[in-house]
């Protein structure tokens, strides 16, 4: 558990708004350790592969979208989850390949859950105050739908440890992840806190 890893991608809107340092600071303050980082411009094919690492993602995402339309009293553009996901994926490919992104791997106890909590829910408008998305952007599903684009929510985070492992392998080679120790790990993980007093 202490070496759990997760992928974080600062999306093109986060880069353009000069939020790289702020995003890193939010994760770093929890005690998580940054073990890999790179800036790149992703291709549309890479983005499709990334979002398809979970074989259920297309069906689940499409069904969530259908349910969200109905909850708002709106008619979904399609009743077929896969057709709706194809529309979403087209928007994501365009959005995520529109400029540079910063991909990172964070490591530490409950890394996936901690990162998701700090990041906030997918829609910035409904993200909690104190979260990255809740504090640093104002976009909403409604605005994204009106503009026929992907929601601009600054950051991607892995949804599970299984997704994280697949996503990390997609974005990073083995040699790009660095194993090292931080002094603060003794405070976070040492059972008895031995060695503090001289």
Image (cartoon, rainbow, N blue to C red):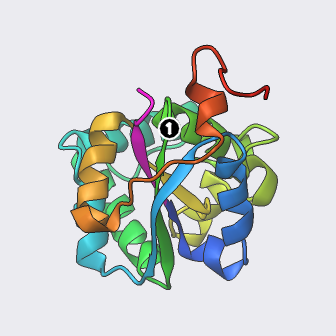
Q: Report if residue 45 lies within the magenta region.
A: no
Q: Report if residue 7 lies within the magenta region.
A: yes
**To which residue does mark 1 refer?**
108
Q: What stretch is highlighted in magenta?
A: 1-8
x, y percent for residue 86:
27, 60
User: Can residue 79 be seen here?
Assistant: no
| Screen quadrant of the C terminus | top right
In the picture as drawn, the residue positioned furthest to the top comes out as 192
Indicate left or right for 64 with 56 as reference.
Answer: right
| Residue positioned 49% across, 83% down in the render | 100
x, y percent for residue 180:
45, 53
Q: Where 28 falls versus 30 (above or below)?
A: below
In the picture as drawn, the residue positioned furthest to the front comes out as 198
Q: Which of 19 and 58 is in front in this view?
A: 19
| Residue positioned 41% across, 84% down in the render | 41
x, y percent for residue 6:
42, 46
Q: State the SS at label 1.
A: loop
| Residue positioned 31% across, 69% down in the render | 47
User: Can residue 26 be seen here?
Assistant: yes
């Amino acid at each position: 558990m202490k070496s759990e890893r997760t992928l974080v991608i600062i999306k093109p809107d986060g880069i353009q708004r000069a939020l790289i340092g702020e995003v890193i600071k939010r994760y770093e303050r929890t005690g998580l350790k940054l073990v890999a980082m790179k800036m790149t411009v992703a291709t549309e094919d890479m983005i499709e592969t990334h979002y398809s690492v979970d074989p259920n993602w297309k069906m689940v995402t499409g069904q969530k979208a259908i349910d969200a339309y109905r909850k708002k009293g709106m008619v979904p553009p399609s009743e077929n989850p896969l057709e709706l996901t194809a529309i979403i994926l087209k928007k994501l490919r365009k959005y995520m390949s529109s400029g540079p992104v910063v991909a990172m791997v964070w490591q530490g106890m409950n890394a996936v859950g901690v990162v998701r909590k700090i990041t906030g829910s997918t829609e910035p408008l409904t993200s909690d105050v104190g979260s990255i998305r809740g504090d640093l952007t104002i976009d909403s599903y409604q605005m994204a739908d009106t503009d026929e684009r992907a929601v601009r929510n600054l950051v991607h985070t892995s949804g599970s440890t299984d997704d994280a492992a697949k996503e990390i392998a997609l974005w990073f080679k083995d040699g790009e992840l660095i194993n090292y120790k931080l002094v603060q790990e003794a405070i976070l993980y040492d059972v008895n806190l031995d060695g503090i007093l001289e």
